[in-house]
Image (cartoon, coloured by chain):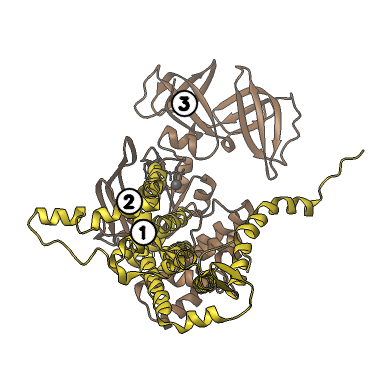
Chain colours: A yellow, B brown
Amino acid sequence: MARRRLGPEGRFLLMALPGAIFVVVFLLLPILSIIVFSFWRTESYTLIPDWNLDNYATLFGTTTYMTFLLRSFTMAVAVSLASLVYAWPVAYFIAKHGDRYRLLLILALAAPFFTGIILRVTGIQGVMGPVGVINLGLMNYGLQPIEFIMYTQTAVGIGVTYLFIPFMVTAVYLSLLNFDFELLEVAKINGAKPWRAFIEITWPLNWMGTVIGLVLVFIPSMAESITPRFLGGPNAASFGQVLGLQFGETGTWALGSAMGVLLFAVSSLVILLMWRTVNLQRSGFTGGGS
Amino acid sequence: MSEPVLELRNVTKRFGSVTAADAITLSVNQGEFFALLGPSGSGKTTMLRIIAGLEVPDEGGVFINGQDVTALPPYARGVGMVFQNFLLFPHKRVGENVVFPLRMQGASKAEQDERLKWALDLLRLDGLADRYPHQLSGGQQQRVALARGLISRPALLLLDEPLANLDRELRKEMEVEVRRYQVELDIPFIYVTHNQEEALTMSDRIAVMNHGRFEQVAPKLEVYTHPTSRFVAGFVGHSNVMTGTLAAIEGGCASLDWNGVTVAVRTPPGASVGDRVDCFVKLEKMRVVAPGGAAQGENRVPGTLRDIIFKGSTADYLVTLENGAELMISEGSETMGFQRKDPLEVVWSAEAGACFPAGGA
Ligand SMILES: Nc1ncnc2c1ncn2[C@@H]1O[C@H](COP(=O)(O)OP(=O)(O)OP(=O)(O)O)[C@@H](O)[C@H]1O
Ligand SMILES: [Mg+2]
C-alpha cells in the first residue's frame, strides 16, 4: 500500500494548525462569548439569554463608569509615556554596551516577575507606603514624610509603570539589536550632531519596536485591577477593578461583559491608531518590495 | 608649493596589545588620488577612522587644510566617507540619502535641490531619487553612497574598500568612474583597498601598509618597480622569489648563489658577502627563449618547460630549472610555439631584481 504523502497545502495546514487552534480557543471564543453575554442580562447570578442593549445604556449613561474608563485610559497613556522615557535609555545602554552580559541584564530587569504580581505590588507598598522605606528614610533624617504618594493616582501610576516597564525595555532592546549602530557613525561623518543623528536615524528605525512596546504596556495598564486595589485610595479605582467586581461580588456578568467589550474596543482602537503610524518603508523594513 | 589638504603627524593608535597605527606621518595634496594598500588587519580602516574623527589617536595630530582637527568630532570635520557595505539609510529615499549632509549643514532648500541634481547627474542616478535603497542594485547603491559622500564638497573623500562588494565586471567599470569623479572634482581621495590591481589602476600615489606601519609611500610606478622593502616586493605585483647566499660583491653588482645556480643581482644596501637574501623578480621581467635564443639580460638559466597557463592576452610559463626550482614567467600568449618538456632558457637582467635580507627561517 502506497503511503499517502502530504502536498504543500497539507503541510502548510499542519504547521498552521497549532497556532490557529490557539487563537480560536484562547482568543476568539472568549471574546465571542463575552460579546454575546454583553447583550444578555443577569438575574440573581445567572445569565439569561434575553437580547437587549441595557448593559451598554447603563455603561454609557452612568457618569461613574465613564469616569473609571477615562481614568484608566489617562493612566495607561501616562504609564506608557513614562515607561517609554525610562525604558529607552536603559534598552539603549544594554544594546550598545551590554556586550556579553546583555541577556543577563535583560533577565535582571524581568527578575521582579519571578515573584508574582501580588508580591511585586506589595513590595512597592513597602517602598513607598506611609511606613515604607522612603518615608522611614526621610524621617530618619528628620525630614517630613511624603504623604501624597501612597493611596493616590500617582502611587498607582508608579506601581503600574514598574509592573510593565520590562515589556517596554525588552521591545526596544530587541529592536535595537537589529539596528546597525554604524549608521550613526555615517550620520555623524555627514555632519549630524549626536542628538540629530538620534532623531534622524535611531528613532525612526526603531519606531516599530517602540510602538510594540507602547502597545504592550498600554493594553495591560488599561486593564489593570490589582495595583489600584493595593496602592490606590478610594478615589483611584480603575475600570479594570470595577470590571472585576461585576464578575465577583455583584455578580452582574452581563454588565461586566459589556465593560469587557468596551475595554477590548478601546484597546483595539489604540493598537490600530498606533499601527497606522508605522510606515514599513520608513521603518527601514526592507522585506516588502515596492 | 601649496599646503597639503591632509596631514598626519606621528599618529599612533593602539587597541590593547595591537598597534593599529604606528607613528604614521603623511601628507596628501590637493587633487591627489592616494591609495592605502595592505593586507587584512594592517590598519587601513583604522587610519581612515582616525582621519574621519571616529577614532581618537593616542598620540599625534590630524590636520586638514592646516587646521588641527585632532580634537574635533566627525561632524565638524567636513570630510566625506564611503563604506564597503554602502551603509545607506534604509528608511530614506535615494534623494534624501544624498542630500542628508547638506540638510545637516543647514543649506537652503534651493541649494539642496541644485546640488542634488548635480550629484545625481554626476553619478548617473537620474530617475532613482524616489527609490528606497533596497530597491537598488549593488552598483546603484554604491553610487548613491558616493553621491552622499560628495554632495557637500568635502575637503577630502575617504573610501573604505568601496568596490569590494561588487562583482568583477562592475568593479572594473566603477574603478574608471571613481577615478573620473576624482579628476573632475579635484579633491583628494584616500582610497583603502587590499586589492593591488585596484590601487595600481586608480591611484597617483600608494602607501603600502603592514602592521600599522607604512612600508613604502611613493608614486605607484615606483612602488611597483622599485619596492623598498621585502614586504612591498612580495605584496605588490607577482614575483619569483630566489633565496640564496651572496657569493661576491663588486660595487653595485653582486652574485647570488641560489641553490647552485649563480644569479647576478643588484647589491642590496648594506649587505655583505655571506648574507642570506631574497631576490624578487616580477614575472613579466623574465623572458623564455629557445636555448641560445636572443634576449637581453645578464642571467640566462637553462630549464625545461613544465606547463603553460593560458590567461588570454598573456600566458604564464612554468619552467623547471636544473637545480629543481621552478620559475613562472609571464609572456605574450601569441609568442613562440613551445611544447611541454621543451628545453629552453630563462633570461632576465640583474636590474630587474630587488633584493632584501631574507625573511623568516
Ligand atoms: N575597535 C577595535 N578594538 C580592538 N581592536 C581593533 C579595533 N579596531 C581595529 N582593531 C584591530 O586593529 C587592527 C587593524 O584593524 P583595521 O580594521 O584597521 O584593519 P584593516 O587594514 O582595515 O583590515 P581589513 O582589510 O580586514 O578591513 C586589527 O588587528 C584589528 O583587530
Ligand atoms: Mg578595513
Where is residue A85 shown, x and y percent of the image?
A: 34, 64
In this view, the residue farthest toward the left is A142
Q: Chain of mark 3?
A: B
Identify the residue at horizontal 17%, vertical 57% (top origin).
A135
Where is residue B317 shown, x and y percent of the image?
A: 67, 32
Q: Quadrant of the C terminus of chain A?
A: bottom right
Mark 3 or 1: the one toward you: 1
Q: Chain of mark 1?
A: A
Mark 2 neighbour class, 10 Å CA radius: few under 14, some 14 to 19, many 20 or more: some
A74 with respect to B260 (left or right): left
Identify the secondary structure beneath mark 3. Answer: strand
Above or below residue A236? Residue B55 is above
Which label is found at residue A7? none
Distance CA(mark 3)–CA(mark 1): 62 Å
- State if disc 1 and disc 3 touch (CB < 8 Å): no
State the residue position of label 3: B278
Identify the residue at horizontal 74%, vertical 54% (top origin).
A13
Q: Is residue A63 visible?
A: yes
